[in-house]
């Protein structure tokens, strides 16, 4: 099965018989969860330990792990924190592109390539493994080379999503922006015509895709760099009219 382990060492600089260890996780929503709490006997100056992480971090998760070490004062009833450390953890499934760190988000990002009922079918899976299975089944139907161990279309799609998030996030989520949408669906334009300072005109850009016989016009109506698709128009799912 899929298991992830945390290895760490405790170096005792003061004389202690044991410490209380608390392992926390901070997820992408900034929710802090206590994953594990243990009392550990110390073995001289160096104590090694391996913990199996909970299944909640799998199959795909982007998490910050924080480990705190305490000792308790029997006379006062209080505690002293002796050490703390943190580590960013990203778990990837071998069948998914490295650009995917959140399966639920990756499913939402299917909206430019999948039908609404297809997305609902994946989301409604009762378990995480079943959701992963349905997600991969969807992409296998669109695999240009079904016998290949990697799906080049899926890799390219989520590479474009990552690029859109990085370059078109000035006014929100990059992949949801109009420029991000067009980039994800059609890839990089062959030519970009920019008009940021024309007199008596709002700033605009034209993206040309000569091989596809298409062009897209984006206008910045407020003058702050928030370019919106003016032509052609689309529906709410990004399908071009």
Image (tube, grey):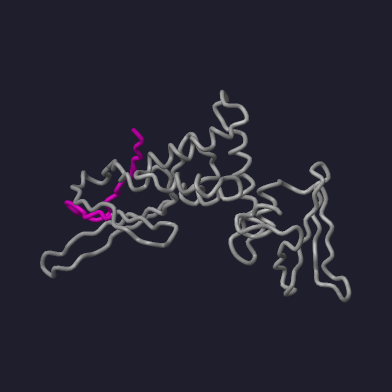
Number of callouts: 0
Where does the C terminus fall, quadrant-wise? bottom right
> In the image, which residues are magenta?
1-22
201 and 40: which is toward the camera: 201
Residue 14 colored in magenta in the image: yes
Q: Position of residue 70 (x, y in %)?
A: 24, 59
Rendered residue at 27%/42% (across/down): 49
Image: 221 above or below 151: below
Rendered residue at 81%/72% (across/down): 202
Where does the N terminus fall, quadrant-wise? top left
Residue 77 colored in magenta in the image: no
Q: Report the residue that reaches farthest toward the top.
A: 147
Image: 187 above or below 3: below
Q: Quadrant of residue 217?
A: bottom right
Q: Quadrant of residue 79?
A: bottom left
Residue 57 lies left or right of residue 215; in this view the side is left
Residue 207 lies left or right of residue 163; in this view the side is right
Q: Position of residue 191 (x, y in %)?
A: 83, 50
Q: Quadrant of residue 66?
A: bottom left
18 and 60: which is toward the camera: 60
Residue 162 lies left or right of residue 196; in this view the side is left
């Amino acid at each position: 099965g899929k298991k992830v382990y945390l290895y760490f060492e405790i170096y005792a600089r003061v004389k202690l018989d044991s410490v209380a260890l608390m392992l926390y996780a901070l997820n992408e929503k900034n929710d802090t969860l206590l994953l594990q709490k243990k009392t550990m006997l110390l073995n001289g100056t160096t104590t090694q330990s391996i913990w199996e992480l909970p299944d909640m971090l799998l199959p795909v998760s982007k998490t910050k792990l924080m480990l705190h070490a305490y000792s308790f004062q029997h006379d006062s009833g209080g505690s002293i924190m002796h050490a703390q450390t943190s580590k960013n953890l990203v778990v990837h499934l071998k069948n998914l592109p490295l650009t995917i760190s959140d399966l639920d988000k990756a499913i939402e990002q299917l909206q430019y390539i999948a039908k609404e009922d297809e997305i609902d079918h994946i989301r409604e899976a009762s378990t995480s493994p079943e959701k992963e299975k349905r997600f991969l089944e969807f992409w296998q139907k669109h695999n240009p080379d079904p016998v290949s161990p990697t799906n080049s279309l899926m890799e390219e799609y989520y590479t474009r999503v990552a690029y859109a998030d990085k370059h078109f996030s000035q006014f929100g989520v990059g992949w949801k922006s109009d420029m991000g949408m067009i980039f994800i669906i059609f890839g990089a334009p062959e030519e970009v015509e920019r008009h940021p300072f024309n007199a008596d005109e709002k700033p605009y850009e034209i993206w040309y895709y000569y091989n596809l016989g298409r062009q897209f016009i984006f206008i910045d109506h407020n003058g702050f760099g928030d370019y919106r698709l003016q032509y052609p128009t689309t529906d709410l799912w990004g399908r071009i009219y």
